[in-house]
Amino acid sequence: NAGVTQTPKFQVLKTGQSMTLQCAQDMNHEYMSWYRQDPGMGLRLIHYSVGAGITDQGEVPNGYNVSRSTTEDFPLRLLSAAPSQTSVYFCASSYLMGFDTEAFFGQGTRLTVV
Amino acid sequence: KQEVTQIPAALSVPEGENLVLNCSFTDSAIYNLQWFRQDPGKGLTSLLLIQSSQREQTSGRLNASLDKSSGRSTLYIAASQPGDSATYLCAVKGNTGFQKLVFGTGTRLLVSP
């Protein structure tokens, strides 16, 4: 029972580099989302998806791209990394409708941009 | 805009105490409320999910209540143990839009032996 799997766990980037954070879930959840967690600010929503081919912006989308080609995968792309993107990134998934919409989170990716 | 507040920000108790963590939210139009636990450097582990139509949920030594009309939830931990030391987060999901979870900034709990 893998749940939500994020890779890598740690990453150091230089300013201006690009990279993709991977997220995969094996629970057949329609809804997937990316959050960033910064000290004193809680978790903030970056992008979300309600199904394959459908994505939308959250609270802090600038500098990030997403796509959802399959139900299982929801990668987050940093186009040109900036020090302000130093954060811990969490991917989450859940069912979209119904009584059981409990959100499950991955273990996080700790990103440092120097 | 939904805002979630957790009080206190930090709490230190001796082992064995019963304790209450508080969560308040400004918009009562919620779909559900979820309590999470986060250990240092780790991800979020779901503890309890309360639907908007429910008043409370229980799991072992944990009991979460929800008063939607007053915009409040409490997480009650009975007979606390050092292993309960972690940050506890509450998050509310609105009943409009798509599943956005709004998080509080958490309560950092330390249970000393």
Image: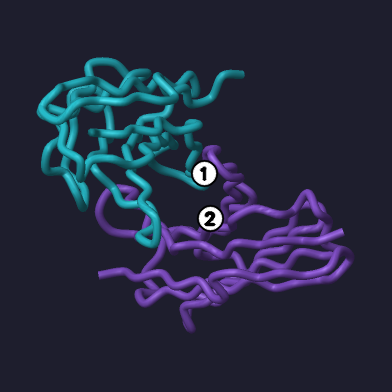
Q: Check whether the beta carbons of the residues at disc 2 and disc 1 lie within 8 A of each other.
A: yes
Occupied quadrant, residue A57: top left
- Of residues A34 and A70, the one drawn nearer to the viewer in this rendering: A34
Residue drawn at (77%, 61%), measured in percent from left and top?
B111
User: Which residue position holds label 2?
Assistant: B34
Indicate left or right for B82 with A58 as reference.
Answer: right
Q: Name the image quarter holding the C terminus of chain B.
A: bottom right
The numbered mark at residue A31 is none
Task: Find residue A10 and report its horizontal and vertical position in percent.
Answer: 41, 25
The residue indicated by pointer 1 is A102
Which percent across, then down, holds residue A38? 36, 51
Identify the residue at horizontal 50%, vertical 37% (top origin): A104
What is the three-letter code of the residue carrying label 1? Answer: Glu
Element marked by disc 2: strand
Number of marks present in the image shown: 2
Q: Is residue A16 above or below residue B16?
A: above
Colour given to chain B in the rendered image: purple
Q: Chain of mark 1?
A: A
Task: Tell me: A13 left or right of A18.
Answer: right
| Disc 2: CA contacts within 10 A as few (<14), some (14-19) or many (>=20) | many
Query: What amino acid type should be assigned to the residue bearing mark 2?
Result: Gln
Q: Nearer the viewer, residue A106 or B49?
A: A106
- Please tell me whether mark 1 sits on a helix, a strand or a loop: loop
Question: In the figure, residue B80 lies in which quadrant?
Answer: bottom right
Image quadrant occupied by the N terminus of chain B: bottom left
At a point 81% along the width and 61% down the height, the residue shown is B112
Colour setup of the view: by chain
Rendered location of residue A46, percent (x, y): 24, 43
